[in-house]
Image: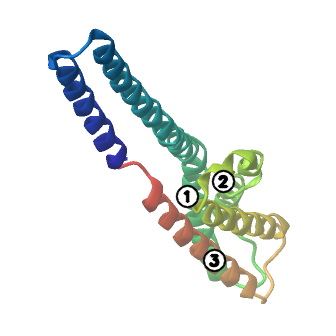
Amino acid sequence: MWHMICGALLAAIGFAVGVTLSTSVDASAEARWWELLTAVGTFGAVVVALVFGLIPLYQQARRDRYRAQVVRWLVLPWLGRVLTGCREVEMAMGDLLRVAVGERADGATLHALNTALPMIDARRLIQHSGELYVLNAEAQEVAEAISDSDRLHDLLSRMELSRPLSPERAVFSSTSRQAKELAEKVERIIRRHAPA
């Protein structure tokens, strides 16, 4: 970029010197005009080269702006909902681990899980997967978050909590751990891409 600007600056200086020399030299008028047209042609060639050099920079800046918009308006709000849903799942799983064997989960815990379930649903973001390609390197992180969120959503939607709880509690601690890991991953993505 700086090379092109320096080249354009040198061409402008050369044009100015060429015009000055061609009009001050005592020669025939035809020779002076020929030198002047040569200087103008050189200057024009440099301007055209500079324009062609700036077009890819403009296109890259445009892609970067579009990428930032996709992250800001599509990915970050969804990630914020997932983070909130993961925190709800963590708390609800902790509550379920404290419920005695053979008893039912209380209504507040069931309500928290029912509230968290749509928050971690990845289908809303998967519908926009065609727009996620602009994220380049960040797309891998977002794809992993979508996949983890989808797995957690599937696990929670298959849990049967309306019956008395069985002695098997490993699924609750495993679900809580998955929610915590997903929350940490989402927090890292949000911290890296959220506008300050």
Within the image, what quadrant is residue 136 found in? bottom right
Q: Which residue is the site of mark 2?
A: 119
Residue 48 placement (x, y as % from top left): 46, 30
Sequence-first disc among 1 and 3: 1
Residue 2 visible somewhere in the drawing: yes
Residue 75 placement (x, y as % from top left): 59, 50
Residue type at mark 3? Ser
Q: Which residue is the site of mark 1?
A: 84
Mark 2 and mark 1 in contact? Answer it, CB < 8 Å: yes
Residue type at mark 1? Thr
Residue pictured at 32% horizontal, 22% vertical: 35
SS at mark 2?
helix
Q: Is residue 88 above or below residue 194?
A: below
SS at mark 1?
helix
Report the Cα–Cα distance between label 1 and label 3: 14 Å
Residue 38 placement (x, y as % from top left): 37, 25
Q: Nearer the viewer, residue 56 or 196?
A: 56
Report the Cα–Cα distance between label 2 and label 1: 7 Å
Residue pictured at 56% horizontal, 60% vertical: 83
Q: Nearer the viewer, residue 66 or 1?
A: 1
Q: Which residue is the site of mark 3?
A: 176
Q: Nearer the viewer, residue 71 or 64?
A: 64
Report the Cα–Cα distance between label 2 and label 3: 16 Å
Sequence-first disc among 2 and 1: 1
In screen coordinates, is 39 left or right of 112? left
**Label 2: how many Cα within 10 Å (few below 14, some 14–19, many 20+):** many
Residue pictured at 78% horizontal, 82% vertical: 102
